[in-house]
Amino acid sequence: MKNKIAWKLFLTYVGIIIICMVTAGIFTTVSLKNYYLERIASNLESNALLVKELIKEDLTGEDLFNVDFKSKTLGKEIATRITIINKEGVVLGDSEKDPRQMENHADRPEIKMAYLGRVGRSIRYSNTLKMDMMYLAIPIFENSQVIGVTRLSLPLTEVKAKIAHIHKMIFMGTLLALSLALGIGLMVARMITKPLQKMADLAKDIASGDFSRQIDIHSNDEVGQLAQSFNQMAGELKTKIETILEDRNQLSAVLTSVIEGVVAIDRNEKIILFNSALQKLFNLTRDKAIGRFFWEVIRNNELNNLLREVMEKKEFREKELTLFFPQGEKIFQVHALPIKGEEGISGVVAVLHDITELKKLERMRIEFVANVSHELRTPLTSIKGFVETLRDGAIDDPKNSRRFLNIIEAHTERLNNLINDLLELSRIESNEIKMEFQSVNLRELVEVVVSNLKGAIEQKGHKVVIDIPFDLPQVEVDSEKIEQVFTNLLDNAIKFTPQNGRICIRAVDKGKDIQIEVSDTGIGIPQEHLGRLFERFYRVDKARSRELGGTGLGLSIVKHIIQAHGGTVGVESKVNKGSKFFFTLPKNQISS
């Protein structure tokens, strides 16, 4: 059944009517039956009193024939069976049968009552007449003594017929009432359930997210008021859901755009919020994180203990943690605070600030200060020592004084180069130097650099190969800065390549960019140093680098110049196999 409520109401309504009709029928039948029986009994008693007066004289005179004769005569006149019984229970006269053939009636219940001086009455099946009969017996007194009993009886066929008629009328009335009830019940059930069905349909629409429908019911009864309340509830629910969705979307947009990792857990230590930054960090989708215990997802005891501590202490906590990932370790500044709900603390939210680069920069700054101090201290110490030596008398020794002055001059030049490189690097990083871009032929530029370093190349017997096509597209660069890049790279190749080595300068068209490579057959660089090679003052072999006159800033300057041109730098190297430094420059884009 589709409309179960309607059928329930209908069947209940019909059932109530049937119960009422059956109850009313039973009550009516019993009442009418009792009424008819009392009426028959009253008539029998009246007739019995009359018969008793007529029979009493014959009974006392012991004229038994006259008793039987009068019984039959009176029985026909009043259409009632009359039976006269003496005090021993012997039938003396009967209007229907021969008294001599009738059995003793002393054990009949109505006779027993009459013997006691009271009116006796009973209803039972007559074996003689084969039907239900009502028997009424009254005592016949003489000198206050019961000398006999007058009993009258009538068949109950008329009562049965009337009761059967009443049953028939009740049955017909019940059918008629049920027929009316069927129509009225269905109509009432539909009137009640139709608005309820509309509400059920509206509830399904609301559950599916459709708030456009309204229930059109104009009645003022409870169902109409419920429908109006339902419409109002649907409107308010729509507004609240739209507000919640808007807030959720805004929160989602904020959490998605936030670069910090954000995680929130409930009081059961299960994750309820896991933003995109953490998804990337842990390489885990949101669906696989939400609903899981946080210690299953974030496998770090310090962070897990921090979240538990905030949950227990209900206080803000801040801590610096190191998390380990396949791509390397990362350092986070974690801020964790409790989420307050209506029943106390409902969870904890933690924000993970990635300070890995900040710590790296801080470490580089410390190393930079230490390196600068060291780089300055070494020549300054030498200069100070030789100045004191000259002051103590060595100045009067022409041979040694000149040698000392040459050493002082060399260290001064080294200091000057170091300071110039630092200033150059600082200006490039702070964009103080304005690049003057112009179209440049890279081959011609490289040939100029090779020519400038020809003396150093020939001194070590190196062979320099320039593998740059003549038709290579020009690039828009600051020629002076790019010349400095080639000079630094080529100078390093010359210094760190043993005698009679080979150096190759090559350029390749990569489509959008030109890639330039400077490779050598030098001593090479161990793999663990390649990642930090372009940092300031970073040296693979510090003693050898200083011996060759390097400041430790050349490659850092190269990196920043190339980045200022919109390019990238890199290095590949193997120990005792040589090194290859490469960088990219954008192609020349000359507007017509």
Image (cartoon, rainbow, N blue to C red):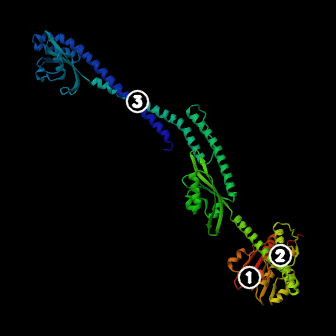
Q: Nearer the viewer, mark 1 or mark 2?
A: 2
Residue at image point 61% right, 33% down: 218
Q: Nearer the viewer, mark 3 or mark 2?
A: 2
Q: CA distance from mark 1 to mark 3?
A: 108 Å
Pick the front one: 440 or 556? 556
- Identified by mark 1, the residue type is Ser
Left or right position of 192 against 101? right
Residue tagged 1 = 579
> Horizontal and vertical percent for residue 81?
20, 19
Residue 417 visible in this rendered orientation of the protein: yes
Residue tagged 3 = 20
Pick the front one: 364 or 398? 398
| Labelled pair 1, 3 in contact (Cβ < 8 Å) | no
The local crowd at label 1, few if under 14, some if 14 to 19, many if 20 or more residues have their Cα within 10 Å, is: many
Please report whichever mark, 1 or 3, sits nearer to the chain's N-terminal start: 3
> Horizontal and vertical percent for residue 258?
69, 57
Q: CA distance from mark 1 to mark 2?
A: 28 Å
Residue tagged 2 = 415
Query: Residue reaching furthest right?
Result: 592
